[in-house]
Image (cartoon, rainbow, N blue to C red):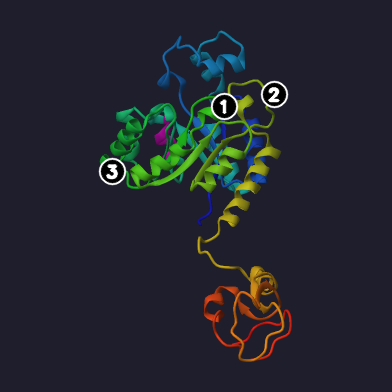
């Protein structure tokens, strides 16, 4: 199995501060993830003034300000993202960011991102999907708030516009996402339907669901994280803290190892054990040469030597070729 690509989703958990963004980069590097991802946008280009916040944002922020006002406070400049990218290069972690409009996408592509991450909010954005496909860069598509029909539509739109390397992430857009809304088997449905690479973008509390996703075949895992869940901001409450993110990475890497190569055969340690655990054919009582071997005078037990019990049918009803004492292994 190939290594799962683990993305630490910093998102807007920098609270609009460059110093916090850089600290998030350090934390992600320490946790052992493959990449850290932010979100890049110009507020005026993605949302109309006065647009209300989503319910989870209201609950997490406990404020009546508009979504426009909230996002404007969380917006980082292109110069700040350039600094973040350079810092990621310096400490050795992949920088990623989701662009929410074409201007920011152009900037990120010039900055040198390895692939374009499309958020769930753009799954129905036909012009933007086509614009993304035209960049000729691999695409990772999140699919929250969508039906399988919506996913197929977005995937086909990207394909028809020229995208030829697409990974699709199952996602439930709720922060935090309760277990009864995860529907992780949808990831398998996506894979079976589109015949593409799949992954999972997680908004649950804890680490068990992304680990389960890897066991089910996820090749990409995205997980929100923060320096402190108690910080003020829309996504902090549904994010892992660094020690939890590090534990998730450890669990995922263990599961990758445990999944193995899929070939069912005993490993070296089992071969050593099997010699004294797998059953052998032994004499149940004293047997004289020439006697007929049968269930009456044969036994199946653990022993260090002897004929494997799988050959029972070849031994029964044949003549004993030797004399045997009780528990002596039968020989051919």
| Residue 77 visible in the shown view | no
- Element under label 3? loop
Q: Position of residue 137 (x, y in %)?
A: 38, 45
Query: CA–CA distance between discs 1 and 2?
Result: 19 Å
Residue beneath disc 3:
162
Which one is nearer the viewer's eye here, 281 or 203?
Answer: 281
Q: Residue at x 51, y 11 (%)?
A: 66
Of pointers 1 and 2, the one earlier in the residue sequence: 1
Number of marks: 3
Q: Nearer the viewer, mark 1 or mark 3?
A: 1
Q: Which mark is residue 230?
A: 2
Rendered position, 167 above or below 202: below
| Residue at horizontal 65 percent and vertical 68 percent from the top | 270
How far apart are labels 1 and 3 at the CA level?
36 Å
Secondary structure type for disc 1: loop
> Dot 1 corresponds to which residue?
178
Q: Are marks 3 and 2 in contact (CB under 8 Å)?
A: no
- The tag on residue 240 is none
Q: Residue at x 64, y 45 (%)?
A: 29
Q: Give the quadrant of residue 56.
A: top right
- First in residue order: circle 1 vs circle 3: 3
> Is most of the magenta stretch helix, strand or loop?
helix
Task: Tell me the CA gap for discs 3 and 2.
Answer: 43 Å
Q: Which residues are magenta?
A: 104-110
Q: Are the two marked residues, 1 and 2, in contact with CB atoms closer than 8 angstroms?
A: no
Q: As displayed, is residue 249 above or below residue 232?
A: below
């Amino acid at each position: 199995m190939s290594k799962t690509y683990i993305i630490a989703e910093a998102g807007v958990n920098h609270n609009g501060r460059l110093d916090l963004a850089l600290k998030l980069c350090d934390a992600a590097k320490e946790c052992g993830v493959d990449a850290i991802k932010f979100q890049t946008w110009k507020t005026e280009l993605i949302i109309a003034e006065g647009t209300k916040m989503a319910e989870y944002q209201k609950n997490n922020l406990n404020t009546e300000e508009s979504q426009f006002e909230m996002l404007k406070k969380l917006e980082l400049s292109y110069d700040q993202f350039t600094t973040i990218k350079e810092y990621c290069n310096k400490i050795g972690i992949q920088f990623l960011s989701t662009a929410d409009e074409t201007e920011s996408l152009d900037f990120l592509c010039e900055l040198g991102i390895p692939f374009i991450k499309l958020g769930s909010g753009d799954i129905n954005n036909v012009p933007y999907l086509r614009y993304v496909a035209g960049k000729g860069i691999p695409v990772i598509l999140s699919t929250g708030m969508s039906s399988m029909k919506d996913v197929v539509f977005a995937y086909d739109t990207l394909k028809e516009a020229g995208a030829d390397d697409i990974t699709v992430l199952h996602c439930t857009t709720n922060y935090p996402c309760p277990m009864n809304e995860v529907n992780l088997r949808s990831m398998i449905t996506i894979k079976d339907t589109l015949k593409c690479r799949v992954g999972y973008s997680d908004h649950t509390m804890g680490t068990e669901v992304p680990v389960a996703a890897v066991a089910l075949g996820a090749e990409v895992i995205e997980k929100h994280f923060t320096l402190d869940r108690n910080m003020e901001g829309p996504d902090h409450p549904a994010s892992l803290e660094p020690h939890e993110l590090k534990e998730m990475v450890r669990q995922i890497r263990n599961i990758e190892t445990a999944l193995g190569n899929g070939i069912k055969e005993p490993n070296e340690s089992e071969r050593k054990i099997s010699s004294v655990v797998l059953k052998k054919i032994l004499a149940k009582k004293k047997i004289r040469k020439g006697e007929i071997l049968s269930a009456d005078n044969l036994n199946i037990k653990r022993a260090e030597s002897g004929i494997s019990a799988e050959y029972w049918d070849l031994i029964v009803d044949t003549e004993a070729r030797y004399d045997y004492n009780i528990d002596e292994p039968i020989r051919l």
